[in-house]
Each structure stands twice: as C-alpha cells, then as structure tokens.
Image (cartoon, rainbow, N blue to C red):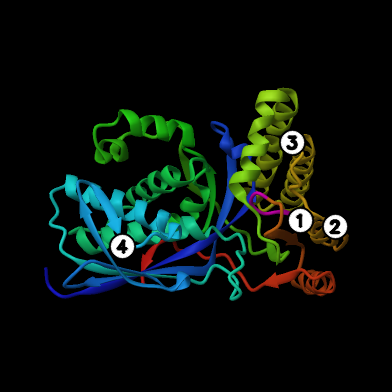
Amino acid sequence: MSNRSLTVKVPGKLMIAGEFAVLEPYQKLAVMAVDRFVYASIQTSSYNSLTLENFHLSSLKWKFEDSTVVIDTEDERISFVKKAMQNTLTYLQEHHIQLDPFSLTIKSELDDVSGKKYGLGSSAAVVTSVVSAILNYFLPVKPSDTLIFKLASISHVKVQGNGSGADIAASTYGGMLEYASFQAEWLLEELETMSSLTELVEKKWTYFHVKPLPVSEKLKISIGWTGKPASTSKLVDKVLELKEYNLSSFEKFINESERAVRHFLEGMKTENIPLLLQGVKENRHALKAVGKAANAELETDQLKVLCDFAEAYGGAGKLSGAGGGDCGIAFMPSNKDIEALKKKWENADIQALDLSLYSKGASIK
C-alpha cells in the first residue's frame, strides 16, 4: 500500500428529548450533533501503533491475530478503541482486504480541559472515529453512514453492555435526528447467532430508525454544564430496574415520555415553537417522576436551577442525557432571552457552553 494518511472528524452529541424511554422498542428520541469533535488520524507505518493523546498513551504497539486486537498496555481506558479496531479489522478481513500496518492517533476535545466530562458522548464519538478512519483508509470506496453506524454500535455495546446508540447516530449522521434504538439486548443476542460481522451488518436491524429533523431558525438553544460528571450506565440500570419492582411507574413514564417526544417532534417539524416547548416541559416532568420512583437523582439541584431559569424567561429546559449532572439544555424564544439566561446561570455556577448544532457527521477532515 502506498504511503498515505487521512484524518476523520467526528462530532459529539447532546440528547434533546426521550432519554431512558428510547431503551424500549420503537420509542423515539431526538438527539443532535454538536461542534466539538474527536479526531482520528491514520497513516501508513512500518509497524502497528496507537496513540491516545488525551490519555497520554503514545505509540503503543499492537497486533491483529485470530480476529483479536492485542495492544501493548494494561490500561483499561483503551477498551472502546480496542473493540472498535478489532471489529472493523475483522469486517475488512471478511472482505479479503489486505491489512497493512498503520498508526492510529486519537484526540478528543469533547471534555473539559481539566479532564471532566461534559456528557457529549465521548466514548461513542471515539468509537465512531476509529471505525470511520479505518474503513475510509482501507476500503476502495467511501463507506456508507449505515456501515459506520452499525460497526460502531456493535463495538460500543460489546464494551458497555447497554445503551441506545443515539450518541453514535449523532456522531455518524450529524445534524438533529429522530431516532429509535436498535435495542442493545437484541444486538447482543444477534452477535451470538451470526456467523460473521458482515452478516449482522447487512441484516435489517428490526427496531432501528433514524431520520433527519428540520431545525427552525426560530429555535434558540443554549447548553449549560453543571460541572458534575455523571455515570450514564449506572443511572440507566437504576431506571430499568423499575420494570422489575414497579412496573406501573415505569409504564407511566414510557407513556408520558412518548407523548412529550411526540409533541416535541411535531413542534420541530411544523415550526410550532409553543408545542415544542410544551414537549420539553412534559419530558422534564416525566424524567423527574421516573427518577424519583427509581431512587435516582436525575434532575440534580443545579439542573433544576438551570431548567427553572429557562422557564422563567419564557422558554423550557431539561436535563440532557442521563442526568445526575453533566449538561442541561434550554430552548428559548429569542437571543435576548438566551443572554439573560446565561447571566443567571453564571451566578448559579452553571457554565454556558459555546456549542452549536453541527450539520455533518463523521467526515474526512
């Protein structure tokens, strides 16, 4: 293979509406890509090497044998990257692609400079960047978004064990999306029965749905960061446990979330801002109620302040993602209201993040 290199740029994400409920079949969620990125650079090398700049891991030697990637480190933080490399290389091997040595360098700007996570889908964006970079490097034609999404989803679910895949969708497709999850349990079961990754990738994923959403110029969005990172997987497990010991509360949440998301999506599609704001408020209250029922503090004190101020200035706010910290999102009637809101947030130690909707997904820089 000739000496060459490329860099892939992958956006982070923010969940908009439908969190937790999206883990159930056919439940829709709104998610958007944001203009903070993960970069994956790949180039021809005399030997295989991996550099993860944010973890200060440099020029790690690795090998791919018997469909397994072995990396010369005991650092467990490489798990997502390792699985993404392994699945993508296995897929290429199934297509008889010659896998010459290469070096791969990953750099993320999704977290705070202190290392604290904003909740922008860092692991999902990293996995997507690895899959996209390797496919673009080795395949003779540009890989489809669907191929990137499916290989990244398989890799992420294999490591994390749960999750909706909405963060991977945002990183892959970009823009604002209407999304329904492939269902992690379904995917893990399929992995056990499929004879190859190619078979699973080419198969119809029963529950999966993704569609771009129009974004009205009337819609003003602001994102606030509480400064407190949260564990998505732990909060997800707590909420899902409700199905075992308090099914009525869980089903009530699903129904309320479905109605809220329907109002939000309809408001987006018809530029009906009052209906959109109604959907955000309904989703906020549904999440607060299910958090209380599950004994999981989804809307923390700071997130409550963030949302209350948004409503006080004529808009609507809610947590973004799993809650418990990380980010909240506000939808406001005007830029003037956004500026007033940011000042209130600052006084409450909530950092307004300089983030905007990003229209592209994974792309070559």
From the image, state whether disc 1 or disc 3 is nearer to you: 3
Image location of residue 210, percent across then percent down: 47, 44
Front-lying residue, 98 or 45: 45
Q: Which residue is mark 4?
A: 72
Image location of residue 362, percent across then percent down: 40, 62
Question: How far apart, in angstroms, are the residues tagged by discs 2 and 3?
Answer: 23 Å
The part of the chain drawn in magenta is 318-322
- Callout 4 secondary element: loop
Label 1 packing within 10 angstroms: few (<14), some (14-19), many (20+): many
Q: Amino acid at mark 1?
A: Gly
Q: Which residue is mark 3?
A: 294
Q: Earlier in the sequence, mark 2 or mark 4?
A: 4
- Callout 2 secondary element: helix
Image location of residue 95, percent across then percent down: 16, 47
Q: Which residue is mark 2?
A: 308
Q: Earlier in the sequence, mark 1 or mark 4?
A: 4
From the image, state whether disc 3 or disc 4 is nearer to you: 4
Q: Amino acid at mark 2?
A: Asp
Which quadrant, please, contains the N terminus?
bottom left
Question: How far apart, in angstroms, are the residues tagged by discs 2 and 4?
Answer: 49 Å
Please report contact status of discs 1 and 2: CB closer than 8 Å, yes or no.
yes
Q: Which residue is mark 1?
A: 317
Front-lying residue, 257 or 158: 158
Residue 18 visible to an observer of this rendering: no
- Callout 3 secondary element: loop
Question: How far apart, in angstroms, are the residues tagged by discs 1 and 2?
Answer: 7 Å
- Rendered view: 42 above or below 219: below
